[in-house]
Amino acid sequence: MDLQLRGRRALVTGGTRGLGRGIVERLAEEGCAVALCARDADAVEDAVAALRTAGATAWGEAADVTDEEALRGVVDGAAEALGGLDLLVVCAGGAVGSPALVETGAGDWRTTLDLNVVHASTAVAAAVPHLRASSAASVLVIASVSGSRPQPKSQYAAAKAAQIALARSLGRELGPLGVRVNALSPGSILFEGGGWARRRDADPEAFARFLEAELPEGRLGTVDEVADAAAWLLSPRASWVNGTELVVDGAQGAPGMAGY
């Protein structure tokens, strides 16, 4: 299937590693010009160089997505470098603080919400003037199954639930402007250097028990599987999909290894 993405212009936050990097590479393979940001300037430079070597039009800038001015600058810079924006993927995220509520301070909650929810809303708001000029504008918020299932870090679960609600609300609000907004919620995804690879290596027996109990296929998902879903959801082929959540989790049960 031709996803009709060739010539589209995309910005991905958190685009140097993991899911963000996989989505950037998939969009580039589909013929998009791509822009990305992340905190590590060297990682941004390396990612852009690799994309250009592979033949893609690519641009990047280092930025902390919790810095509103810097994030807005990235959005405007990407639009200027690429000649506009058609697609925005909000992928940077994470959590700070303990899995235990009583050991987690208000600052941890604020930082986690800033990193996930405020970052997402700021990026979309900054992108709207550019996206309105597109004939196929689409925004994708990378959330998590932790937003709808019990998660040991309640601050992370709450932030991801808020991202899903944000996408639903913005789909309604921005639809009249020709901008689709959806959430994509991955389950547990394994890639080297990521959190699940560290858990596997730290306690392989518990990891094996977790796979057997919670993953019907006995494995975690891959970056490519999420990137494929993201590319379709962003594409004109999904033109009547708006304000919803796509779950990519292999029918996973619990989102974490607590108790294994």
Image: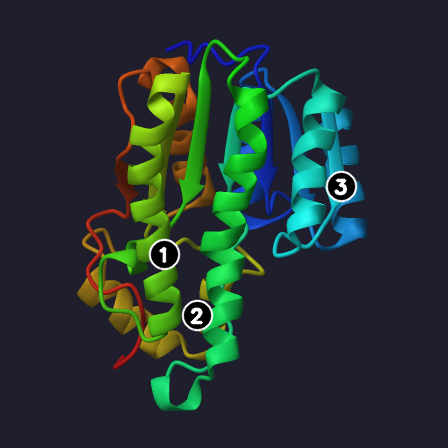
Disc 1 from disc 3: Cα separation: 25 Å
Q: Position of residue 42 (x, y in %)?
A: 81, 51
What's the amino acid at mark 2?
Arg
Residue occupying the far bottom of the picture: 102
What's the amino acid at mark 1?
Lys
Say which of 113 and 150 sits in front: 113
Residue 129: quadrant of the picture: top right
Residue beneath disc 1? 160
What's the amino acid at mark 3?
Glu
The answer to whether residue 172 is left or right of residue 45 is left
Residue beneath disc 2? 200
Label located before the other in sequence (1 or 3): 3
- Which residue is drawn at the image coordinates 32% and 47% (left, top)? 164
Say which of 12 and 218 sits in front: 12
Label 1–label 3 contact, CB within 8 A? no
For the question of whether residue 175 can be seen, the reply is: yes
